[in-house]
Amino acid sequence: MLSVVGNALGMVPLVIAVALGVGAIVAQSVVLFTIIKFAGAAYLVYLGVQAIRHRKEAARAAEGEVAPRSHWRQLGEGFVVGVTNPKTIAFFVAVLPQFVSFEAGVIPMQLFELGMVFIVLALACDSIWALAASAARNWFARSPRRIEHLSATGGVMMIGLGGVLALSGNKH
């Protein structure tokens, strides 16, 4: 859940950037978009490699032998994933302005409010997924071997997601 909250908090600077017009610059700049995209992809690959490298520790942690990661670290990792997701800023730039009412005034405030609604909805949906994943993890945790395989599989999936992020959505 802390990772989910961190991810949502990581979207707040993106909403602010879009509300202030910086998001449009990032979305239009091939260089900035690519830098953010590759930073996010590299971080996902790093997290995936760490999950694979430390899969035995994950199994021991499930049995209570290893101290869990700190709450701040879990929150921070989620934040980095959220703030380095270039598809989120592209989504905000492409979709949020469609719901702005020019007659209602203060467009940056409307963009900010719309972005915050998106974040609250994402937080609710991602929380449901996290709770479901936690229940599944509890089943896997009954066997150190299963949790070790789960950790390795999750790591491979993060590496794959990082690769997909790096290779998709290229700006031309």
Image: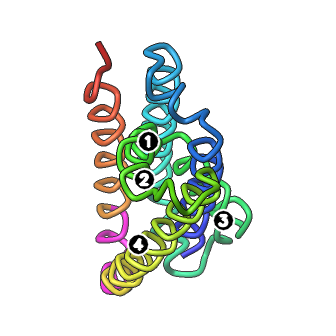
Query: Mark 2 to mark 3: distance in Å?
Result: 36 Å
Against 71, residue 64 (above or below) is below
The 10 Å Cα crowd at callout 4, few under 14, some 14 to 19, many 20 or more, is: some
Asked which secondary structure carries label 1, the reply is helix
Residue 155, percent from left and from top: 37, 49
Name the residue at 49% across, 45% down: 47
Q: Quadrant of the N terminus?
A: bottom right
Q: Which mark is residue 93?
A: 1
Mark 2 or mark 3, earlier in chain:
3
Residue 56, percent from left and from top: 46, 59
The 10 Å Cα crowd at callout 2, few under 14, some 14 to 19, many 20 or more, is: some
Q: Which mark is residue 69?
A: 3
Q: Which mark is residue 151?
A: none
Against 25, residue 83 (above or below) is below
Residue placed most toward the observer, 168 or 164: 168
Q: Which mark is residue 126?
A: 4
Query: Mark 1 to mark 2: distance in Å?
Result: 6 Å
Q: Amino acid at mark 3?
A: Arg
Q: Amino acid at mark 2?
A: Leu
Name the residue at 49% across, 13% down: 31
Asked which secondary structure carries label 3, the reply is loop
Question: Mark 2 and mark 1 in contact (Cβ < 8 Å)?
Answer: yes
Residue 110, percent from left and from top: 57, 60
Q: Give the side of residue 39 with respect to residue 132, left or right.
A: right
Question: Mark 4 and mark 3 in contact (Cβ < 8 Å)?
Answer: no
Query: Mark 4 to mark 1: distance in Å?
Result: 22 Å
Residue placed most toward the observer, 68 or 167: 167
